[in-house]
Image (cartoon, rainbow, N blue to C red):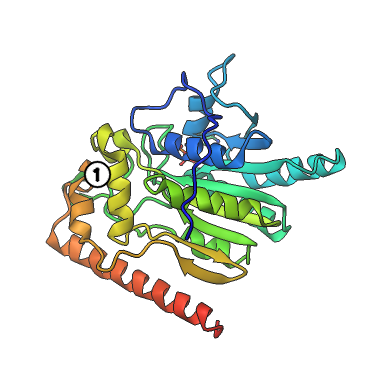
Amino acid sequence: MAKLTIPAQELMYSGHAACPGCGPALAMRLLLKGLGPRTILSIPACCWTVIATPYPTTALGVAVLDNPIEATGASVSGLRAAADAMHLKDVEVVGFAGDGGTVDIGLQSLSGMLERRTNAIYVMYDNEAYMNTGVQRSGATPRGAWTTTTPVGEGVRGKPEPKKDVMAIVLAHRPAYAATLNPSFPEDFDRKVERARSIEGPRFFHIFAPCPPGWKFDSAETIALGRLATDSGIFPLYEVVDGRLRITRKTGELKPVTEYLAAQGRFRHLGAEDAARLQSEVRAEWDRLLRRERDDLSGSH
Ligand SMILES: Cc1ncc(C[n+]2csc(CCOP(=O)(O)OP(=O)(O)O)c2C)c(N)n1
């Protein structure tokens, strides 16, 4: 495949309010490079409202609508309808929401937008908890993770329930395009933004977005942790176009999940049994993706 050049234009400016090493900030920066200036963003209550828009300033070089946390899907449908009514053909309408605002509070709104076939991109940046309000667990928090509402102590060992599978929910709506993206792999990230831009209809990005204070790791390690997440199979990279799945990064053997767990304080309390359980779940999911890719390629899906 020809090597892509990531666009040089910066549409996320310095002076924003993100923490050092913020994964969601990296996600936004790369996303806007790929989308360009004719973008209308709808951002609900989440870290990014705080990062982007401490009144009266903004760190973003595109139009932004600040909307209620439950309404991102509905707002992008409205923005697209307005753009169409105004004959604005060349704008990309994009919702940019956290995992809590997507898999929990905004799920019906996302479902509505996909079902209406709204021509827009919905982005879920996944820092795996409600970070803006102080690290509360969300449906996307992985099993075993410490959060302020899933503490670790006598008889309690982090979140008991597994992570909600947002891609499965989205794919059940048969979107025009859906992909997982990780800022630690910027060429793959940018290629997926380009691909999505060439397709009309409802499109969805699930972006891996490490949070140093919430996950308890050194802010200099964000990129390395992201690479580990994908190369251990915790966050596989793939895309689904017209219902056909293609894995976009394969490295041979998966790295052991223990490396990923050991790199973060939120998993410090987990033992060998927890790691073994996660390892077998990750292996099974990776095998499922490989099978699905094979079936889709051979046309039997
Ligand atoms: C209906 C409603 N419930 C709760 C809140 C409070 N609130 C504001 S931001 C936020 C956290 C959002 O978490 P997430 O979507 O995961 O994004 P993150 O903060 O992690 O970036 C919450 C709960 C709200 N604004 N509206």
Whole-percent x, y for residue 155 in the image: 18, 52
Q: Residue at x 52, y 52 (%)?
A: 191
Q: Residue at x 53, y 53 (%)?
A: 192
Q: Residue at x 43, y 46 (%)?
A: 186
Looking at the image, which is closer to me, 72 or 158? 72
* Residue 202 sits in quarter: bottom right
Q: Residue at x 72, y 53 (%)?
A: 118
Q: Residue furthest front?
A: 2
Quadrant of the image for the C terminus? bottom right
Up/down of 189 relative to 176, above or below: above
Q: Secondary structure at mark 1?
A: helix
* Residue 173 sits in quarter: bottom right
- Answer yes or no: is residue 29 visible: yes
Up/down of 169 relative to 85, above or below: below
The residue at which mark 1 appears reads as 266
Whole-percent x, y for residue 194 in the image: 58, 50
- Answer yes or no: is residue 159 visible: no
Label 1 neighbourhood size at 10 Å, few (<14), some (14-19), many (20+)?
A: many
Looking at the image, which is closer to me, 3 or 42? 3
Q: Residue furthest left?
A: 272
Q: Please, what is the three-letter code of the amino acid marked with disc 1?
A: Arg
Q: Cβ(mark 1) to ligand 1 < 8 Å?
A: no
Q: Residue furthest top?
A: 56
Count of labels in the image: 1
* Residue 153 sits in quarter: top left
Whole-percent x, y for residue 11 in the image: 56, 29
Whole-percent x, y for residue 9 in the image: 55, 31
